[in-house]
Amino acid sequence: MTIPGGVHRVPSIAVEPVIRLARWRVFEADGKTRHFVGWHVDGHEGRVSNVIRSFDITSRRGETARGRIYVLLGEPGQDSDADYVWAAYRRINKIASYAEVTKEYTHGSVAPMPSDGGRPATDAADDRLDR
């Protein structure tokens, strides 16, 4: 299913359990949830994850609320396709404010994950928005 604006649902976790991201960043949305945003190297497209549930800074692997694993490759960076998908995610999910928190995921001091504010793990749009 394609969502207007060029974003679409991704394959199920059973089909695509692990996503490898390059040129990645991490954003906090409305002070409640955090999301990986980057270039999906195997899918050749920008990607926004579901809510991050956990992250291991040593292996650079994170798990989302739905159970998908994200592996962060190389150094953080910016990707224009991922930025496009992140903007669509914010619009679709009515995100009023956001902040980049990438440095917490590179310097060995990841803060506890913020609560999800009671939001379901499947907000309004899927990956290229992941849910």
Image: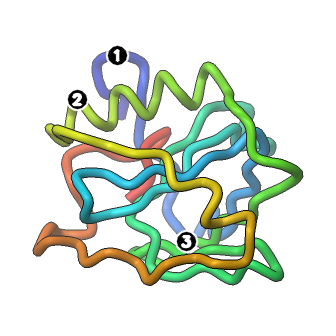
| Residue sitting farthest toward the right | 74
Residue type (three-letter) at the residue carrying disc 3: Arg
Task: Give the spatial CA distance, label 3 vs label 2.
Answer: 23 Å
Residue, x 74% and y 64% (percent of image)? Answer: 106
Dot 2: few (<14), some (14–19), or many (≥20) neighbours within 10 Å? Answer: few
Decide if residue 29 is on the left or right side of residue 16: left
Instruction: Name the residue carrying label 2.
Output: 91
Where residue 22 appears, as percent x and y from the top left, is 78, 44
The correct choice, above or below, for 87 with respect to 77 in the image is: above
Which dot, 2 or 1, sits closer to the camera? 2
* Residue annotated with mark 3: 68
Vertical placement of 34 versus 82: above or below? below
Image position of 116 with respect to 23: above or below = below
Q: What element carries label 2?
A: helix
Q: Nearer the viewer, residue 8 or 120?
A: 120
Q: Which of marks 3 and 2 is nearer the N terminus?
A: 3
Sort mark 3 into few (<14), some (14-19) or many (20+) by Cα contacts within 10 Å: many
- Judging depth in this view, the residue of 130 and 80 nearest the camera is 80
Q: Is mark 3 on a helix, strand or loop?
A: loop
Element at label 1: loop
Place residue 43 in its image quadrant: top right
Residue depicted at 71% across the width and 74% down the height: 61
The amino acid sitting under disc 1 is Gly
